[in-house]
Image: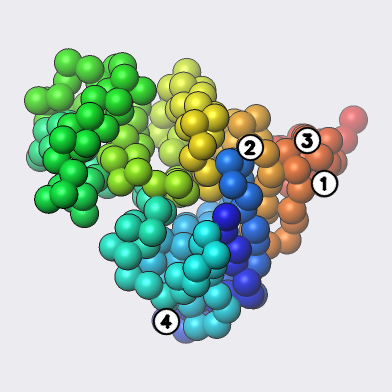
Amino acid sequence: MLKVNHIDVYHGYVHALKNVSLHVKQGEILAVLGANGAGKSTLLGTLAGLYKPKAGEIIFQNKKITGQAPDKIVRAGISLIPEKREIFSGLSVQDNLLLGAFHRYRQDKADIKHDAQEILELFPLLQGREKDLAGSLSGGLQQMLAIGRALMARPSLLLLDEPSIGLAPLVVREIMGILVRLKESGVTVVLVEQNTKSAIKVADSVLVMERGEIVHAASSKDAVSDTLLQEAYLGRVRS
């Protein structure tokens, strides 16, 4: 579904992504792990069109999308849920959802209303809160709203940047369970997480980044049994 071939990305003079290549298969969850500053958010931002590579190419569903504007990336079927969610706190839950389908609004009004209802069924805790200001929601509900808003664009690829940040463990488990359900419905997911245990549990494959480079790749099953990965990223030590 998605192929990234040897991309280099700079933030000013900082070489943020160095010769990064990866392949995401249709219908899988790919977890991207690594410490702060490893380049994980830059990777998602580049896939979403926020940053333009200096070199390399990005191919999505057999079409080259390298350097395209974010709105064209959304129309192509890729939605980004940024770190800290970035919801419109002064707007209602309903309006936040509708804004996720801004590019479809003139042509698909009826379908958009139907999609919004399906989002509320996916996140039942948002039901009855449609008129509430998004800023009045708890962190967990705001994260659900951010995911729902992204889904309103009808993406085939969902990019999530640290969805568990600041959330209680029970809410994190619920969010991860929702990602599995989305995968089962046909949505492909790239998940950036520092909560490595939760990410590996739901992922099909795992990449580890350090200083802008991919330094390790494995299936989730292999990642669980990989001693070096466990020691470096899960905080476990040899007995």
User: Where residue 20 sits: x, y (%)?
Assistant: 63, 69
User: Where residue 29 sits: x, y (%)?
Assistant: 59, 41
Tell me the SS state at disc 3.
helix
Residue 105 located left or right of residue 219: left
Name the residue tied to disc 4: 12
Residue, x 32% and y 70% (percent of image)?
69
If you read the primary sequence from the N terminus, does the residue marked by circle 2 or circle 4 appear first? 4
Return the mark for residue 221: 3
Q: CA distance from mark 4 to mark 1?
A: 33 Å
User: Where residue 224 sits: x, y (%)?
Assistant: 77, 35
Tell me the SS state at disc 1.
helix
Name the residue tied to disc 1: 228
Residue 26 located left or right of residue 94: right
If you read the primary sequence from the N terminus, does the residue marked by circle 3 or circle 4 appear first? 4
Q: Are marks 1 and 2 in contact (CB under 8 Å)?
A: no
Name the residue tied to disc 2: 203
Return the mark for residue 179: none
Residue, x 30% and y 25% (percent of image)?
118
